Amino acid sequence: TISYINTITSFEPLCTNQQKKTPNCTTLTEMKSASVLGFLASGGLAAAQTVQSKPFNLLVQSDSKELDGRALGTCHSGAAIESICLLNDAKAVFNLNTTEGAQPGAGGLSGVLTWNLPSQPPIPSSMSFYADPSTNVALPLFYPGVDNAQYVGFDADDLMNIVSYLDDTKSPPTGQTARVLKQWYVCTTYYTSYTYQTLTWVLGNAKPQNPSCVKVDVKRKFVEDSTEAKRI
């Protein structure tokens, strides 16, 4: 089995947009293409989630006229890492990968939100949360593979949610009752030198400490004329 981490660390420095390729310079496209080898060698997305939904877009619903109705895209945030951001001229296509035979729960059918990183071949990537200890605003990021993927669901109104059983607002904490959470915000965020207007998740029940954050819901809209759900 090829290690994804070992694959990444073996590359020479990346070329900038202004540089021509030299023997000591590797392009980002080459890095992405090579990194998929380690991912595929470990089994990829099919190891745990075997049913892929029809493709869909994600749309913002908000009281903010500036944000309401806009589609979410993806923005480069590192080598083979993408954030979920607002773009004026593009929208991303996502899937929900679930386990065969899984039944809907309190928040709908739960699964892994996936997106294909453009490459040759495309690299299947899944969403997980990045949380910096200094803030309660977590960043949903796409990484190759399914390690630490954050499960999400879509309710009867096609609104994206996360189900949690933990309630530590009382002592002792409990974990018996399902709670359907929709703590999505759009904020101006900073991650590894990249600043974007991104989709975020606010941890806990406090208000976001980032003053740019605006409360939103995230609605799934299936791509017209798309194929049916399939096994992968």
Image: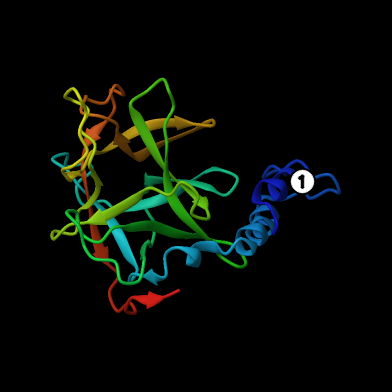
Residue 194 % position (x, y) = 50, 34
Query: Which quadrant of the structure image shows residue 65?
Result: top left
Residue 91 in view (yes/no): no
Which image quadrant: the C terminus?
bottom left
Residue 135 in view (yes/no): yes
Q: Is 37 left or right of 57, judged from the image as shown?
A: right
Q: Nearer the viewer, residue 14 or 131?
A: 131
Q: Residue visible at 45% across and 63% down?
A: 48
Image: 207 above or below 166: above
Pointer 1: what residue?
10
Q: Nearer the viewer, residue 64 or 38?
A: 38
Total numbered badges shown on the rendered structure: 1
Query: Which quadrant of the structure image shows residue 108?
Result: bottom left
Q: Secondary structure at mark 1?
A: loop
Image: 116 above or below 217: below
Residue 36 % position (x, y) = 63, 59
Image: 117 above or below 197: below
Q: Nearer the viewer, residue 194 or 218?
A: 218
Q: Residue visible at 57% across and 64% down?
A: 43
Q: Is 148 left or right of 38, judged from the image as shown?
A: left
* Residue at the right extreme, as displayed: 23
- Residue type at tag 1: Ser
Image: 84 above or below 167: below
Q: Residue visible at 48% across and 54% down?
A: 146
Q: Nearer the viewer, residue 176 or 66?
A: 176
Q: Is 145 left or right of 84, judged from the image as shown?
A: right
Q: Residues within 10 Å of mark 1 (few under 14, many from 20)?
A: few
Which image quadrant: the N terminus?
bottom right
